[in-house]
Amino acid sequence: MTPPELRDLVADALALWEVPEGPPRRVAVIEGGVALEGFGLRVLPAAAEDLPIRWWIERPGQRRPCTSVTGLLRGLRNAVGAGEGEARRLRVAGS
């Protein structure tokens, strides 16, 4: 996944989680990864020798490994506080 694709994925996830974006909270491409400005978070790709880790979520004094897109999104959701409150659930029912 390229940094622009990762930026778009994270920006779409923030919108889905209803985290407001704007000047203080913006997703930007940085040196191979993305930064969530206003949250002090960075997502950086892992080195080949770090496999099965694919990305690192970094915040000052903390570095968390992520092995999948699902794990990455879960980690980001928790880090920005979007997992608090009632989660929306998709319900499928017959007609």
Image: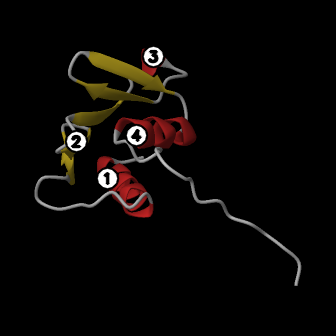
Q: Secondary structure at mark 3?
A: helix
Three-letter residue code for mark 2: Ala
Label for residue 35?
2
Viewer-side label of 2, 3: 2
Residue at image mark 3? 50
Three-letter residue code for mark 1: Arg
Please rate how many residues cluster around mark 1, counting C-alpha atoms within 10 Å: few if below 14, some from 14 to 19, many from 20. Answer: many
Q: Residue 44, position in %: x, y? A: 31, 32
- Which residue is painted at 46% across and 44% down in the image? 84
The answer to which quarter of the image holds residue 39 is top left
Q: Secondary structure at mark 2?
A: strand
Residue at image mark 4? 76
Quote the CA–CA distance across marks 1 and 4.
12 Å
Quote the CA–CA distance across marks 1 and 2.
8 Å
Residue at image mark 1? 7
Q: Residue 95, position in %: x, y? A: 88, 85
Q: Does the CB distance between marks 1 and 4 fall below 8 Å?
A: no
Q: Which mark is first along the chain, 2 or 1? A: 1
- Which residue is painted at 36% across and 48% down in the image? 2
Q: Which mark is first along the chain, 4 or 2? A: 2
Colour scheme of this structure image?
secondary structure
Q: Is residue 13 above or below residue 55?
A: below
Q: Residue 26, position in %: x, y? A: 19, 54
Q: Secondary structure at mark 4?
A: helix
Quote the CA–CA distance across marks 2 and 3.
21 Å
Quote the CA–CA distance across marks 1 and 3.
22 Å
Please rate how many residues cluster around mark 4, counting C-alpha atoms within 10 Å: few if below 14, some from 14 to 19, many from 20. Answer: many
Q: Which mark is first along the chain, 3 or 2? A: 2
